[in-house]
Image (cartoon, grey):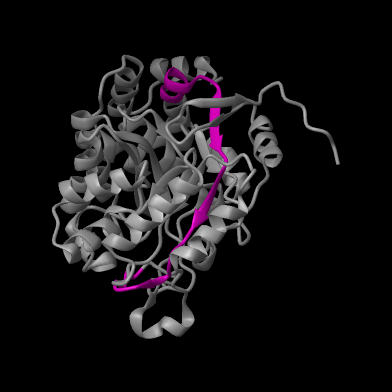
C-alpha cells in the first residue's frame, strides 16, 4: 500500500499552490478540471504524481494487480489505411509482405488452446475488404460453437466503422449483429489521439474521434463493455492528451461501459515517424499517474507489459496502474514490429504472478470483465 505520510507531506508542504489545490481535491474525491490536468503534465514532479495516483488506485483496487490468461489473433496486417505511427500494417499493394488469415486458419489457432485455462481471445488487426461483415459474423459464431466459454474481445471501432460502412448498416444494427454472432466485448485500439489536428496527421482517413466514441457508446448502451486507449509520446502536446482523457471521461459519465484505460507508448521503429524521439520512462510513469488521477470514473488503468517491458510495467504499479494485461503467449506482432521492449511477448502464469509479487502487490487472475478468477497471493509455485 502507498505511504500515506507522503500524501500528508504534500498537503502540508510549500509546493505550488495550484498543485496543492489539486492534491486536496484528489484526497477529497473531487474531480479535477481540464486546466488542472494540463498543469499536472506541465509542472508536477514524478513523486507527487505517484503519491496521488496510488491514493486513487488504492481506493479502487487496494493492493490488487490484475492479469488474465489470453491469446491474440491478428487476422491480417494488410490495411487500407496508412497511419504514420504504424510499423505493423502493409498496404493492399504490399500483400506479399503481409498475411491475411482465413476463418479456418484462425480456428486452428483457437483449437491450439483446447484444454488450456485461457479465458479470452483478443482479435484485432488491419482492415481489408474481404474480411467483411459476413466474415466476422462467421468467425465469431465458429469460435462460440467450438468453445462457448471463451470470451471474444474483438475488433476496434476503426475496423467496425469500415465494415459497417461497406455493408451499408448503421452502427446500432452492426453492433447488435456482432453481439448476436458471439462478440463479448471490444478492445480499446484505434483511439490514438482524438484531437483532429493530431489525428489527421498521424491517422488520417480512418474513423474520426466522434465515430470512435459513437461506436463505443452504441455498444455500451446495449449493456456491453469495452476498453479505451491513447497513443502518447509523439507529436501531441500535453493539452491534446488531456482533451483525449476528457472526452473519454465524458462518455464514461454517460455509459459507465469502459472497463479500463490503456495508455499506449509510441514506438518509433520501422514507421513513417521514426524521426520522432520516444519519450522517457519517467514520462511513461507520469502519464500513467495523470491518467489515473484524471479518469476518476474508470475503475482500472492497464499497462501492456509487452509494449513497455517487464521492468517498466513493474514500476507502473507504483504510479496508478492496477492491471498489466495477460499471458499473451507470443501471439501478437503489433508491438514487436514497432520496436517494443518485448520482442517475444510471452509470459507464463507463474512468471506474471512472480512479477507482480516482486512489487509487493497481490496478483489476481481476472476475467475480461474483471470478475476475480483466482487470488494468487498465497500460491507457491514449484521451482523447476
At a point 28% along the width and 36% down the height, the residue shown is 37
Of the pair 118 and 56, the residue shown nearer to us: 118
- The magenta region covers 56-84
* Quadrant of res 190: bottom left
Up the image or down, 360 lies above or below 89; here it is: above
> In this rendering, does residue 283 appear at all?
no
Of the pair 363 and 100, the residue shown nearer to us: 100
- Residue 185, percent from left and from top: 36, 42
Q: Name the outermost residue toward the right.
A: 384
Q: Name the quarter where the N terminus is drawn.
A: top right
At a point 39% along the width and 50% down the height, the residue shown is 141
- Residue 267, percent from left and from top: 46, 62
Q: Name the quarter where the C terminus is drawn.
A: top right
At a point 26% along the width and 19% down the height, the residue shown is 30
At a point 25% along the width and 46% down the height, the residue shown is 244
Could you tell whether 11 is left or right of 337 in the image?
left
Amino acid at each position: 500500500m502507498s505511504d500515506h505520510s507522503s500524501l500528508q507531506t504534500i498537503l502540508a508542504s510549500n509546493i505550488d499552490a495550484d498543485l496543492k489545490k489539486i492534491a486536496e481535491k484528489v484526497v477529497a474525491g473531487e474531480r479535477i478540471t481540464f486546466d488542472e490536468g494540463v498543469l499536472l503534465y506541465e509542472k508536477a514532479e514524478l513523486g507527487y504524481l505517484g503519491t496521488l495516483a496510488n491514493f486513487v488506485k488504492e481506493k479502487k483496487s487496494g493492493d490488487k494487480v490484475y492479469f488474465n490468461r489470453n491469446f491474440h489473433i491478428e487476422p491480417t496486417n494488410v490495411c487500407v489505411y496508412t497511419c504514420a505511427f504504424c510499423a505493423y500494417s502493409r498496404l493492399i499493394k504490399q500483400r506479399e509482405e503481409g498475411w491475411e488469415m482465413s476463418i479456418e486458419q484462425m480456428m486452428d489457432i483457437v483449437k491450439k488452446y483446447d484444454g488450456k485455462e485461457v479465458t479470452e481471445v483478443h482479435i484485432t488487426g488491419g482492415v481489408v475488404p474481404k474480411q467483411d461483415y459476413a466474415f466476422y459474423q462467421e468467425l465469431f459464431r465458429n469460435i462460440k460453437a467450438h468453445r462457448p466459454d471463451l470470451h471474444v474481445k474483438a475488433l476496434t471501432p476503426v475496423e467496425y466503422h469500415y465494415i459497417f460502412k461497406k455493408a451499408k448498416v448503421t452502427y446500432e444494427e452492426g453492433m447488435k449483429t456482432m453481439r448476436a454472432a458471439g462478440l463479448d466485448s471490444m478492445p480499446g485500439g484505434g483511439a490514438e489521439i482524438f484531437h483532429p489536428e493530431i489525428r489527421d496527421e498521424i491517422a488520417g482517413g480512418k474513423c474520426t474521434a466522434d465515430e470512435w466514441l459513437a461506436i463505443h457508446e452504441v455498444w455500451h448502451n446495449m449493456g456491453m463493455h469495452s476498453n479505451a486507449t491513447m497513443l502518447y509520446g509523439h507529436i501531441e502536446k500535453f493539452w491534446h492528451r488531456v482533451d483525449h482523457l476528457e472526452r473519454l471521461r465524458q462518455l464514461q459519465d454517460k455509459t459507465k461501459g469502459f472497463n479500463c484505460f490503456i495508455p499506449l507508448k509510441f514506438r518509433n521503429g520501422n514507421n513513417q515517424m521514426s524521426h520522432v524521439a520516444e519519450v522517457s520512462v519517467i514520462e511513461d510513469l507520469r502519464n500513467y499517474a495523470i491518467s489515473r488521477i484524471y479518469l476518476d470514473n474508470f475503475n482500472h488503468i492497464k499497462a501492456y507489459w509487452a509494449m513497455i517491458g517487464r521492468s517498466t510495467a513493474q514500476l507502473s504499479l507504483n504510479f496508478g496502474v492496477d492491471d498489466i494485461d495477460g499471458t499473451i503467449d507470443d501471439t501478437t506482432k503489433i508491438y514487436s514490429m514497432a520496436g517494443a521492449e518485448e520482442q517475444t511477448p510471452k509470459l507464463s502464469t507463474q512468471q506474471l504472478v512472480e512479477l507482480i509479487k516482486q512489487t509487493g502487490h497481490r496478483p489476481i487472475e481476472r476475467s475480461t470483465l474483471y470478475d476475480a478468477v483466482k487470488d494468487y497471493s498465497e500460491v507457491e509455485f514449484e521451482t523447476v
